[in-house]
Image (cartoon, rainbow, N blue to C red):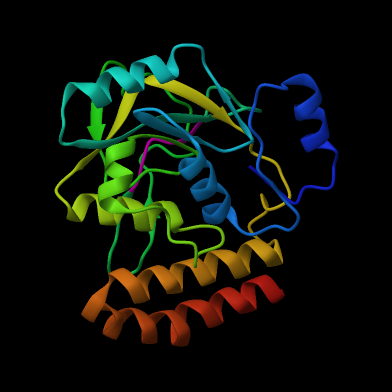
Amino acid sequence: ADNGSIDGSAEEIKKKFPDVIMIENKDNLGSPVAINDCILKSKGEFVFRLDDDIIVTPDTIEKMLKVLKSDPKIGAASCLYFYTEEPDVLRTAGFHLNMWTGKTDSPGRDKVYKDELKGKLVERDAVGGGSLLVRRSTFDEIGLFDESYFLTYEDVDWCVRLRKKGYKIIVVGDAKLYHKRLGGLALKENPKRVYLGTRGLVLFMKKQAGLRNLFFIPMFFLIYYPIKFVKLFI
């Protein structure tokens, strides 16, 4: 799916890969809309969601698929993310999720990776949607990505819904990909990133946190966000 790009990439893909089915949106409709369109138009027993700024190693999908097939209670499989620009630095190996603050913590993030997860299958609260392998029947049961998010937190929201149904989310320690560090929204002080990240977080907590919002809302809007605003302003 191409979300209204203006760099000529859609035309280039059609020219070089004519067998690929492309959904061309005239405007940027948001990541969940584009991903959902792909899922609905695709065929097959398994769906592999992949963002456009990722390089996958040749055996990654095979290793993830083997794990996913091994246990019907595994609802989704993911892998280790490294930086394209720094291939020995770990970007993420899935997330621990704090349902009081909505924050995600990724063990080992931005540190040099020393094969700590080699040969291991690690269960996580959530994983990034940039690389996610799922049975089609699981989407039929859980539903697609919530299109109200536009960008950020739609993947975390889906993982929470998956786990509420009793499924496990597994990161395959022997499977790798490389994710671009730099980009239009890469900088933490990028205004659009700040807006979309904040919006996604608030929507997620409103939908999933329940009574914990009695803590989150005053903490976020009266303490955390004013401090962040001042830091960004400076």
Give x and y (percent) for residue 19.
66, 21
Q: Residue at x 33, y 72 (%)?
A: 207
**Residue 116 visible, this orientation:** no
Find out whether residue 94 is within the magenta segment: yes
**Residue 152 visible, this orientation:** yes
Query: Compared with residue 87, is residue 3 higher up or lower down, i.e. above or below?
Result: below
Q: Residue at x 85, y 38 (%)?
A: 8
Find out whether residue 9 is within the magenta segment: no
The extreme top residue here reads 58
| Rendered-image quadrant of the N terminus | top right
Residues in magenta, as a range: 90-95
Query: Compared with residue 20, is residue 211 higher up or lower down, i.e. above or below?
Result: below
Does residue 89 appear left or right of residue 63 in this picture?
right
Does residue 207 appear left or right of residue 23 in this picture?
left
Give x and y (percent) for residue 129.
45, 43
Looking at the image, how many numbered discs can be counted on the residues?
0
